[in-house]
Structure formats: structure tokens, C-alpha cells
Amino acid sequence: MLHISKGTASAVTDLLRRCCAASVYCWLTKLNALSETQMSGYAGVLDQKNTLVPALYSIIQDPDSELLEPVCHQLFELYRSSEDCLRRFTLQFLPELLWVYLRRDRHSSGCIEALLLGIYNLEIVDKDGNGKLFSFLIPSLSKPSIYHEPSSLGSMALTEGALCQHDLIRVIYSGLHPQRETFTAQNRFEVLCFLMLCYNSLVVYMPHSSHRAVCRMSSRLCVSGFPRQQLKAWTTPCMRVLLEPQFMVQMLAAVYHAIYNGEWDAGREALDDILYRAQLELYSEPLLLGNAMKSSLPGSAPDGSQGRKVLQVEVTSSIRRISRCTITAASIRRLRWKREDADQLSREEDSSGLNDADEGFSSGASSSSQPSGVRGRKSRPSARRTSSTSLDCRAGLGSGAEARRYSILSLQEQHLPEETELLSPGKQSRSPSFNMQIISQV
């Protein structure tokens, strides 16, 4: 095993520090020589400088570096530009800047404090200098999204309250933050929480180095000054840092994204440290969110074969499926149409049944007086079946006997004249007693 003495290690560290300082100094010199028109084209070149970002981290972490103040000034100038790439380049160092600012003496980190206040004052106003009003929508389970389908949640009760809340869009507004010229004990974490909110809104664009930095910042801020710090690999003595629950919630949001995007081990360690600090401080909001995140984590790292781990989301069809038992305006119309069709069909059957009974009675009454050729033809359906249909349709008139008496009398009144007409001329009609026998058979 190779043993390195303390003197050799300090010499190597000093050499690396000088190399980082030289790289950063060259970068500052080139930026100062660029004009405003050339700055927009320089945004694409920053992503190709692989050695610049580690060098800038080294300068920010060094409390005795002479380049810290010009670096903070240049990062603020990049954030003031209109190019989104340049603004994201500055924002990727925010976790490290927050850690250095909170652990150091306030008087020794004046340039970092000025940079944080400058980013805050730029974010709370629009291009015209007016205060921004931030808003976001509260998602509703009745609307489909990439995470769920309303039909998969089961049948929802169609109550008056549910109908009132169906198309209601709930919007939460926040904003009109005041300008801050300096940090105080009252407004410090208000500003820092807002900066972490800005970072989380763009966390998908941050590189892996920024994800590692936010996990490292979360772990160190939560365990510094507590017995758990002795179990960490870094043994630099640090004082206990005061934290507020809202700031810890923002840290959890950033750590959760880092867990599923390449920082599985560091992200889980940061999550455990945040829960450890929340339990000691008895902060309910970080405890609730942190335990929910920990319970939802899989047993092993997802997509272990790939370098970048992403959160798996099952994309379902966007076609809205309506349950058959759901009561809608269309279903009510269909039900009304079915009832109307059934009523019309029953009326048509009643009219056809009466016609069949008329024809059957006339043919039965005149069959004996007609020639044999006429008697051999097929007769219409029997009057017995049509009379039963007529009785069913008139069931609402009274009892069965009354309905039968009504049908017999109606047949006598309506069809006896037709019978005399159907008899061939020169023949005499049957007696009334014979006609009543036919009617009784019907």
C-alpha cells in the first residue's frame, strides 16, 4: 500500500488549488473581453468546458481564495443576462453557495451574501421591474394526467358537492416579495427558501455535479453539530446550523429528484439525514414528506444498468372511459328515447291487434255464407290471441271481467254492421243468438 505523508498531501493539494485558480483566472479574463453580442454565443461553449466547473467549486469552497469575489461578481453578471443557459450555469452552484454561506461567519462571506441577494432581487421582478405574482394549479383527481386515470380510481359518487367541484380550477397565488438589501435573522430563510424554490423549478436542467452538491449540502446542514456527524467520512468540525421546516421541505424536493437521476446512494443518505434532523427538531412537515418519500422508494436502484436513473411513469391512453353506471345527460336522453320508442311500439301493437280482431271476427261471421272457394283461404290469426292483447292493453280500466265485457261490447258496436256488409247478396244473416255465441268464443 502506498503511504503518502502529510507534507506530500499538502503539496498536492496546494498544486491542485493553483491549477484551479489558473483555470478560473483565464476564464474570467476571457469573459471580460467579450462584448454583449458575443456573450449570447458563449453560452453554448460553457457546457463544453469540463474542467471549469470543478475549478469553480474549488474556488467557492476555499475561504482564503482571492478569486472568490470576482467569481461571485461574474456569476451575477451571467445571471443578469437574457440567455437561459447562462442563468442555469450560475444557478447550478446555488447548493454549494448556500452551504458555504450558512457554515461560515457572516462577515467573511460578504460576496456570497451579495450574490444570493442579487439573484433573489432579480427573480421577484419581471423585465419591467414590477413585482411578480406566482401561481400554480392544484391538481384534481377527476382530471386525467400522466400519473392516473379517473376511471381507474373506481366509481365516484355523483353528489351535488362533486358536481360543484368538477370543473372548479383552484389556483394558489404567491408573490409580491419585498426587495431585500441585507440578510437579517427574520428574513434569512425567507430568501433562502425562495432561492431553493427557483432551483427546484429548474432542477431537471442541472448537471450531475449540481445533484451531488445538493445531496452533500443537505447532509452536512442536517448533521453538523450533532453526534451523527462523527459517523460521516468528512470530519471537518462544523457548528450547528439553524434550519427552518420550509427550507428542509425544499431540500427534500431537490434530493428526491437527485435520487432518481444518478445519485441513488448520496440521495438516500441525504434523505436519512434530513429525517434525522426533523425528528430532533420535531418538524412535522419534513417528517411527513420525508417518510412518504422513504416509503415509496424501491428496494434497489432503478435502471441499474444505465448511467442515468429516471422515475418510471406508465403512460396510459388519453381516451376518456365513461363507466356504464355513470349518470350523465347523454344517458338520461337515451333512457327517455327508449321509453318513447317503447310507448310508440305498444300503441302500434294495440292498433294492429284491433285490426286483426276486426278482420278475424268478420271472416268468422261470414265464412258460412261464402262459397267453398272463399272458405279454403288461410284466415287471419285467431281472435282469441288478439283479444288477449286487447285485454292486456286495457288492464288499467278495472278487473279482468270488466275489461272482457268492455271488449265484447265494443266488438258488438263496431263490427256487427261490417258483418252484414260482408254477407253475399241474397243471403240472410245469422240470428243474433248465433252472433253472440261467436263473440263469447272470442
Image: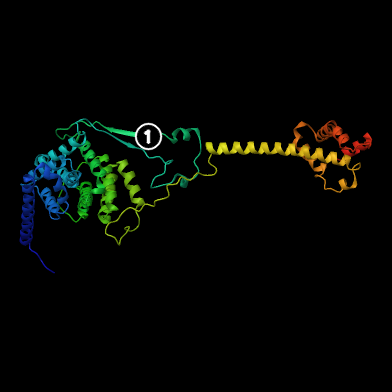
Is 197 placed above or below 220 here?
above
Secondary structure under tag 1 reads loop
Of residues 47 and 159, the one drawn nearer to the viewer in this rendering: 47
Q: Is residue 65 among the parts visible in the rendering?
A: no
Local packing at callout 1 (Cα closer than 10 Å; few below 14, some 14-19, many 20+) is few
Q: Which of the 4 image quarters holds residue 15?
A: bottom left
Q: Which of the 4 image quarters holds residue 440?
A: top right
On the image, numbered disc 1 is attached to which residue? 170
Position of residue 426 in the picture relative to residue 143 (left or right): right
Q: Which of the 4 image quarters holds residue 310?
A: bottom left
Of residues 246 and 377, the one drawn nearer to the viewer in this rendering: 377
Q: Quadrant of the C terminus?
A: top right
Q: Is residue 152 among the parts visible in the rendering?
A: yes
Position of residue 88 in the picture relative to residue 387 (left or right): left
The image shows a total of numbered marks equal to 1
Residue 128 in the image, given as x and y percentages of width and height:
19, 31
Residue 183 in the image, given as x and y percentages of width and height:
16, 35
Residue 137 in the image, given as x and y percentages of width and height:
35, 37
Of residues 322 and 195, the one drawn nearer to the viewer in this rendering: 322
Amino acid on which disc 1 is placed: Arg
Is 48 placed above or below 383 here?
below
